[in-house]
Amino acid sequence: MKRTTIIGAWTLVITLLGGGTAGCQSDHTSPLTSAALPTPTPSCPLATPTVVPNPALPNALYALVQNYHCAACHSPSGLANFQDLSNPQACYSNLVNQPATVTTGIRVVPFNPGGSVLILRLKGLGMDQMPLDGPPYMTPGEIQLFEDWICQGANPQ
Ligand code: HEC
């Protein structure tokens, strides 16, 4: 009886060892282990929304606002302080999609220059032409730059 028990015990040990080894090998080769998983695909750049942290009027347009001294009146301490145009960020936030205060309408309607009060003001169509103390007024080519920007969606820089 004693001899049989010892042989039985050894059989059990050998079986366990064999099973254990087989288990390790299958762990190293199984496609289900984490080592065999494909590396995560980097996030798609097209899925990232365009967020402009500090939206501003594009430089070329702001240079014209400066050349025609719009902020002489359109600044916090100026005659026309209801619409601050004294820096590129103020220009963007006070023009795009903002209702006009003096007339009806929206100052800049993205994709619609003809419906934008800013363009009517620069051309003097049906309301006082800007700059209010002009001439000089912006040339047709300069006004066209604002129209092109609005046609492209009036995007911030
Ligand atoms: C001499 C002062 C003065 C200057 C310079 C001036 N503005 Fe004005 N602006 C005003 C006044 C005052 C009003 C409102 C009264 C009116 O319609 O005449 C106005 C109105 C506007 C409006 C309509 C805003 C609304 O909410 O109804 C826009 C847009 C505008 N100006 C843009 C400009 C731009 C762009 C420039 C530069 C090219 C400019 N202004 C230069 C005095 C000025």
Image: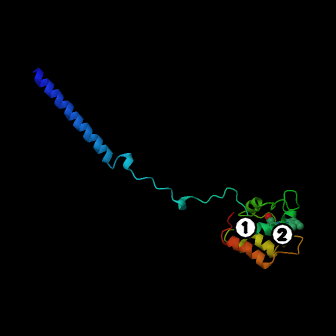
The image shows residue 126 at horizontal and vertical percentages of 81, 75
Work out whether residue 112 can be spotted. Answer: no
Residue nearest the observer in this picture, 7 or 111 = 7
Q: Is the residue indicated by label 1 positioned so its CB lies within 8 Å of ligand 1? A: no
Work out whether residue 137 can be spotted. Answer: yes
Lower position in the chain sequence, tag 1 or tag 2: 2
Residue at disc 1, secondary structure: loop
Q: CA distance from mark 1 to mark 2?
A: 20 Å
Q: Residues within 10 Å of mark 1 (few under 14, many from 20)?
A: many
Name the quarter where the C terminus is drawn. bottom right
Residue at disc 2, secondary structure: helix
The mark found on residue 108 in the picture is 1
**What's the residue type where badge 2 is placed?**
Asn
Question: Which residue is found at the position 77% from the left and 59% from the top?
Answer: 90
Residue nearest the observer in this picture, 11 or 101 = 11
Q: Quadrant of ligand 1?
A: bottom right
Location of residue 24 by image quarter: top left
Position of residue 85 relative to residue 8, above or below, is below
**What's the residue type where badge 1 is placed?**
Val
Q: Which residue is mark 2?
A: 67
Residue mark closest to the camera, 1 vs 2? 2
The image shows residue 92 at horizontal and vertical percentages of 73, 62
